[in-house]
Every structure is written in C-alpha cells, then in structure tokens.
Image: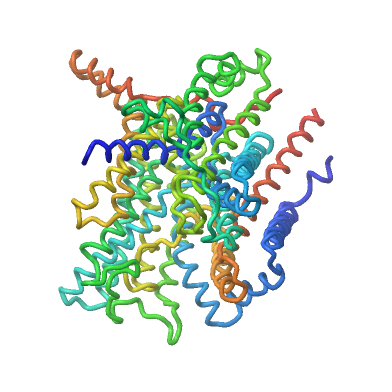
Amino acid sequence: MSNEALLIGLAGILATAAPIVFATLGETLTERSGVINLSVNGTILLSAMASFAVAVATGSLLFGFLTGMLVGAAVALVVAGFSISLRQSQVAVGFVLTLMCRDLAYFLGNPFMGLSGPRLPALAVPFLEDIPVLGPLFFRQDLLTYLSFVLIFATWAWIFRTRPGLSLVSVGERPAAAYVRGLRVNRMRYLYTIVGGALIGLAGPAFSLSVKAGWKGTISGLDGYGWIALAITIFGGWNPIRAAFGAYLFVFLQWLGLVLQPSLPGVPSQVLQVAPFPLMILALLLVNIGNTDWVERTLAALPDSTRLLISRVLRSLRASPPAALGTPFEQE
Amino acid sequence: MRPRVALSGAALRLGAVLLALLFTTGVLLVADAPPLEAYRQIVVGSLGSVKKITDVLVAWVPLVLATSGLLVTFAAGLWNIGIEGQITLGAIFATGALRLTLESGLPPALAIGIAVLAGILGGAIWALLAGLLKAYGGVNEIFGGLGLNFVAVALNVWLIFGPWGRPGVASMSGTEPFPDFYALPALAGLRLSPWALLVAVGGFALVFFLLQGTYFGLRLKAVGKNPRAAFVLGIPTIRYTLLAFVLCGGLGGAAGAVQVTAVYHRLIPAISSGYGYLGLMVAMLVNYQPLWMPLVAFFFVALNIGSIQLPIVLKLDSSLAGVLQGALVLFVLAVEGVRQRMRRSAAKMAE
C-alpha cells in the first residue's frame, strides 16, 4: 500500500470514529456521575433517523444536529427519571429503551428510507492542511471530526482539571460524602445524564448526516455501534482520552479487516466486520482481571520478581468503575 | 394518602397497559396512520384464524424456552444478555448434529433427538463462557454476553457462507434445507409441531418446579439477593452462578434447536429472531416470576405475528410491535416506581 493511500485510510479512521467518540464521551460523563445509560444503541438509531428526517424536511444541517442532541437528551431524561426519582433498575430501563428507541426509529423512519439528504462537507483548515502528514491526517476533515478532537480533551480537562469535575467524580465515587459537603447529588446526576445523553445523541447525526449519510432502516448498518460505545467506555476506564484511544483502535481494526479482505477470499465480509468483538472481550478481560480475588491469590504464591512484573502489567491495564455506579442515592 | 397507596396492583397494571396503548396510538398518529385499523390488523393477523393462532404458537415455543432460561439467571441476579448468542449456538450445534447424522443413516427420530440435545449443549457452552468470564475474569455478564452475541452471529454467517454453504449459491437465505423426514413432524397443513410445543412446556415446567419447589431454587435466589451473605452461609456462589448460566444457555440452545428442526429446517443468518431480547422484556414484565410468563409471552409473540400484516396492508413498518412491547414494560416499571414512591412517602408521614 502506498503512503498516500495509507494516509487517506488513517484520516478516514479519524472521521469514521467521530460518532463512536461522541457516544463514548457521553457515556463516560454519565457513568462518572454514577448512572449507567444502557440505552445508547437505541438512542443512536433514533437520533440518526430523527436528525436525518429533520435535515431533509428543513434543509438545515444545524437543525438536524440539534434534533439529534435533543433526542439523546430526552431519552437520557427518561433514564434519569426512572433510575433517580422512581428508583427502578437502571439496567432494566436502559435495556427497554434501547430496544424501543430502535423500533421507534424503524417505524417512524419508514417514510424517509432511501431519501437523499444533506451531508456535512469537508472543511480544510487553511495553512494547517499543508503541513506534511499531519495536514491530510487531521486538518482536512469535516467540522464534526474537529469537534470530536476538541471534545476528547475538553471532557478530560473538565473531569480531571476543574472544580466541577472534581465534584462530578466525588458524586460518582462517594455520593454520601459529596452530599455532606453540600453537593446536590441527584440534581447533578440528572444534569450529567442529560448532558451525556445529548453527546450520545450527537452520534446519531454524526452517522446519518456525515459518516454513513442517509437513512436506510434496518440496513443502515448502525445497529451495534451503541453497544460498542458502552464496551469502549469500560475499556477506557472512565477516562476520556483512554476511551477515545479505544474508539480509534476499534475503527482501525474494522478498517484493517476491510483492507485484508482481498487477501482472505474464503472469509465473508460479515465475519471481518465483527473481528474487533472478540478482541473487545479480551480487552475487557485484561482491564478487569486485575480486580479479581483469585488473581491476587495466585500472584501471591509466585516468586517476587515474576509477581511484581505481572502485577505491574495488570495494574497499568486495570480500571475500576466509579464506586457508586448503578446504585441510587437517597437524600435524607 | 392511605387509600391511594392501597390501590391494588392489578388496577395499576391495567393503568400501565392503557398508558402504553395511549403512547403507541400517539406514535401511530405521528406516523399519520389510522390507529384503530392498525390495532385491528394486529388482532386479525394473530388471532383471526386457527392457522394464525398456530403460527403464534410456533413463535411462542422459542420465546417461552428463552424466557424460562432467563428466569433462572434473573433468580441468580444475573443479566444474561448473551441469551441471543446462546440461541444461535444452539441452532448451530443442532444443524451440525443433523449434518453428521444425515450421512450416518441413523433413523430420523433418533437424529432429531440428538440434534436437540446438541443444541442444548451448544447453548450451555456459550453461556458457560459468559459465566466463566464473569466469575473468573471480572467481566460484567452484560458486556461479555454482548461480545459473545456478535461472535455467535459472525460464526453463524461464516458457516452459512463458508463450510456449510449451499454449493455454488451460498447466500443469506441459509443452508441447504434438510429433507422433510429430518424435521419435527408438524400438524397436517400447519407449521406448528406438537413436539416443539412439548419441548417448550417441558422447559417451562422444569424451571417452574426448580424455582418454586426445590432447595436448589431457594439457594439460587439467595445468591441472587445477596451473594456475599449467601457465600458466608456456605453456598458456593461461583458454582451456583455458573449453573444458572448453563441452565439458561441450555434452554436457549433448545430454542435454537427447535428453530432449526421445527421451523426453518435449515440454518439462517437471523436464526435467533430476537427472541432472546424479547425474553428479557417478558421476564421484566412478569417481575421475574414464572406463573404468568407463558401468557405474557403469548401476548408478545401475538403482537409480533400480527404486526406482519402492517407493511402488507397499511404500508407501515412491523416494528410497531416492538414499540408497544417496550412501552408496556416501561409503563409497568413507571407505575411500580410511583407506587413504591408513594409507599415511601406514606411511611415517612406515619413516622
């Protein structure tokens, strides 16, 4: 493969990963506050359909993107209401919503199937686009991809470098302690679930108005990305930068599958498309296995030098969820 | 507050059903479709004739099997989302067994029996994988299961297009159909096989008895309610967790085997037909208790079968069934949440 083709391929990966990055960042923010929003897969489908429909009807890309974010925020509000105010299982509510939003998308999107709609144009950054290698890679993308770059670092900085971010982490880790210090735990959880939901919702139009422009119902090829985003959130250890790395890695592996396709004629494309999933399980295994008791027990029996090496590797991979993830908080 | 708190559960559930219908009617109006005609089509399409009712029963079999399995994992406090993959693996193993016996010349009845057992084995293995990932790898069963679902689909598609493909014309329509005598016999002129029905009833009876009438079921529920306490009381929690997975996977695998031996007579790409995910919703709707499950499952598949009419008659997408099912579960959860909230505030006022 020529250098040029490789560069175009890699630039394509950065653009293709943008929706997954949005969804992963949104879920990371949500889960940092202690709420699991399991509706991601359905939310993305519904917001992709709704934003495409609005963009077609109004001819405005901006309205399309806003619709996507609004849908995401609305679904997230339902998740928050059920789990925080009505104290129902977050997993149950999220799962039902993920299926229902998918079916709503297919049902309501029926009249818009196969229509041609607007598509976000590429927008090269003057001067920067001429830098060798970096220019074509980073600065000849569309607005959305630039936004994804910015949001990765913005979310990271928000969580780890600001005061409100510190409050957010404390609400997800020790809600009771945060409450005693004067934070309104449940109100913050509502807020971050809705903001996170809006980001997840942005993934929809990022697909239907850019990366996979259009709406084709069940064959839109969007079903499944939400589940990937959820897995990447864990893989990313609830850290935006590590999560973004996971998203790029995932898309890179899918791209690799497509590139390798011609040299593996016996393997149907559907199989290569899912090749990242077993690797995802493996990744989750590596991230989590350091937290289990039996690994600690087994390690204790090993000679010092080996034990230190293995535990260092495991520790560098390990990630623990926010301590209060998935548990309701009752203010007395 | 008091009299409102005393509202009976049945009345509240009825309210939830009405709210769900109201919501779905709203969705139909948004889509500019005639709601009453749409509902009429669903009813006629599912219960309009004996043939339609038996078609609903054909779909009822895998749903009841999958949901029965899920009641076991839910009792153990597990969210076995991997059920879809377990159904698929059951279908794959059953097909594999039939292919092997096809050449050996075994009597068909024996071959089908072996195929169903192989399906149970396949589903159980896939579930055990998710269980091991959870118990020894610390991987949450939701994500382990989801990953395994995708792998199962890939494996299935690869088999259909690759090694088991129809010679020359491997396609999404599935593998070469098995000869007629390799199918579970159906009622004359219908698609329903009484044998498949028997498998479903048997699976449900097994789970009902296990959960309601045995010491094993009691201990399983203890593990589900509070694993730490159960462990301290001497219940081997990891073994019970794995057993719950294996039982559920086995029942899911049986559902897949029935799909192959009684419904499609071959392996197709979407062999699980979403019955696993639907089963999760049914289990939620019956609050994870077995008693009313078969009835609710019948209602759910009736919606599915009935909505097949929608694209034909009204040019609507058949996914309306999923919207109504989702709305039902959502509103039942909402009503339950409101009731608990009122009870809490009533208790607070009494203090």
Residue drawn at point x = 60 percent, y = 40 percent: A69
| Quadrant in which the N terminus of chain B appears | top right
Q: What residue do we see at 61% from left, 32% from top? A: A195
Is residue B300 or residue B293 the one in the foreground?
A: B300
Nearer to us in this view, A143 or A270: A143
x, y percentage for residue A114?
Answer: 51, 61
- Viewer-nearest residue: B77 or A157: A157
For image coordinates 19% across by 76% down, the residue present is: B106
- Image vertical order of residue A135 relative to residue A97, above or below: above
Does residue B31 appear in this view?
Answer: yes
The answer to which of B249 and B8 lies nearer the viewer is B249
Q: Quadrant of residue A307?
A: top left
**Is B52 positioned to the left or the right of A265 in the image?**
right
Q: In this view, which residue lies farthest toward the bottom? A: B188
Instruction: Answer with left or right where residue B19 lies relative to residue A57.
Output: right
Q: Is residue B194 above or below residue A55?
A: below
Indicate the position of residue A320 as horizontal and vertical percent values. Answer: 43, 25
Q: Quadrant of residue B272?
A: bottom left
Examine the rendering and report whether any part of residue A88 can be seen: no
Up/down of B305 relative to B277, above or below: below
x 38%, y 68%: residue? B259
> For residue B328, what is the image quadrant?
bottom right
From the viewer's perspective, tell me whether residue B6 is left or right of residue B154. Answer: right
Above/below status of A312 relative to B117: above
Name the image quarter holding the C terminus of chain B: top right
The colour scheme of the drawn protein is rainbow
